[in-house]
Amino acid sequence: MSSPVEEPSLVEWLAQTRSWADAQLEEALSNLDLGPALHGEALRYALMGPGKRLRPALVRLICNQVGGQDADAAPAAVAIEMLHTYSLVHDDLPCMDDDDLRRSRPTVHKVYGEAEAVLVGDGLQSLAFEWLARVTGSTEQVTILARAAGPAGMVGGQSLDLAATGRGDAIDADTVRRIHASKTAALIGAAVELGAVAGGASTDQRVGLARYGRGLGLCFQAVDDLLDVTGDAGTLGKTPGKDEADQKATLVATLGLEGAREEARSLAQETREAAQDVGCPEGGLALALVDHLLARTR
């Protein structure tokens, strides 16, 4: 895959990409009908909070790596962040994970009420597909995002997760891995796939990148399970300790703390190998991102 002669450090690139993603989101919001004033305000509150913008970053990174430009990546980057944010808004609801803190501030339902939070999630999901379809006209990109977000992906994973809640100690590690693959890895994998499509990747590149995207998603969620035990609210930007309190099905619950750490390390190594197999340069951003996700504290 193509790569700049001299890449910035990952930290610099992620900071620059957050600014780029925020600018793309603002442009989209200014060109979309956000409905009644209160709904638009709540929608902006959810979407424009201080998030990591990991999924837009992946779209941009992979698009650039296979030869595309930022402009090619922008529509999918916006759409996937809208869809991810909708999932967080719904995930935080009392009927789901019942969280009061997200992105270092009160969750949408704590500020605007549960009913409006449901509508904000619904609205963000609709806007994601409207923007992607309107700007790209690509049924392939729309299909990738819809499949990853729906019953075969994120929504199905959330259903499995809810069914396992309260039975964390009785759930085996393979079941947890299936939950992670659907709930988290499907959408992160879609970010990689969308970047590949937007950048014009070859079929062989897309096959290899699919392994990279899935591995990143599984590694990300494994670390998330660990951070719920080892992190603090100030750093995480959300409430720690809820997985154990709610008896959630996590790798920590099934494998223990050290077993979960080893799983995360193993997943990271598999993901590095997938990146190398498709020609991502040693010391480049795609490989550095794996180490960054493994070592993250939020």
Image (spheres, grey):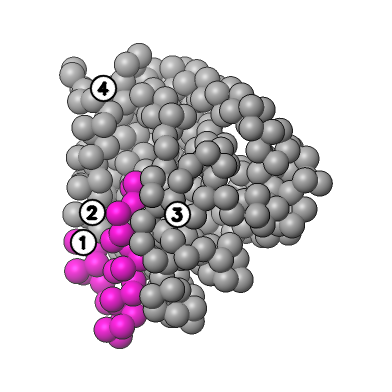
**Mark 4 is on which residue type?**
Ser
Mark in front: 4 vs 1: 1
**Mark 3 is on which residue type?**
Lys
Q: Is residue 67 left or right of residue 181?
A: left
Whichever of callouts 2 and 4 sits on the residue coming sooner in the sequence is 4
| Residue with the mark numbered 2 | 22
Q: Which mark is residue 3?
A: 4
Q: Which residues are magenta?
A: 26-53
Distance Cα–Cα, label 2 vs label 3 = 21 Å
**65 shown above or below 129:** above
| Residue with the mark numbered 3 | 238
Q: Residue at x 21, y 69 (%)?
A: 31
Q: Is residue 58 magenta?
A: no
Would you say the residues marked 1 and 2 are in contact, meaning their CB atoms lie under 8 Å apart?
yes
Q: Residue at x 52, y 56 (%)?
A: 149
Give the image quarter of residue 62: top left
Give the image quarter of residue 47: bottom left
**Mark 2 is on which residue type?**
Asp
Q: Locate the C terminus by quadrant.
A: top left
**284 shown above or below 107:** above
Q: Which mark is residue 77?
A: none
Mark in front: 3 vs 1: 3
| Residue with the mark numbered 1 | 26
- Dot 1 alpha-carbon crowd within 10 angstroms: few under 14, some 14 to 19, many 20 or more: some
Distance Cα–Cα, label 4 vs label 3 = 35 Å
Asked which secondary structure carries label 1, the reply is helix
**2 shown above or below 128:** above
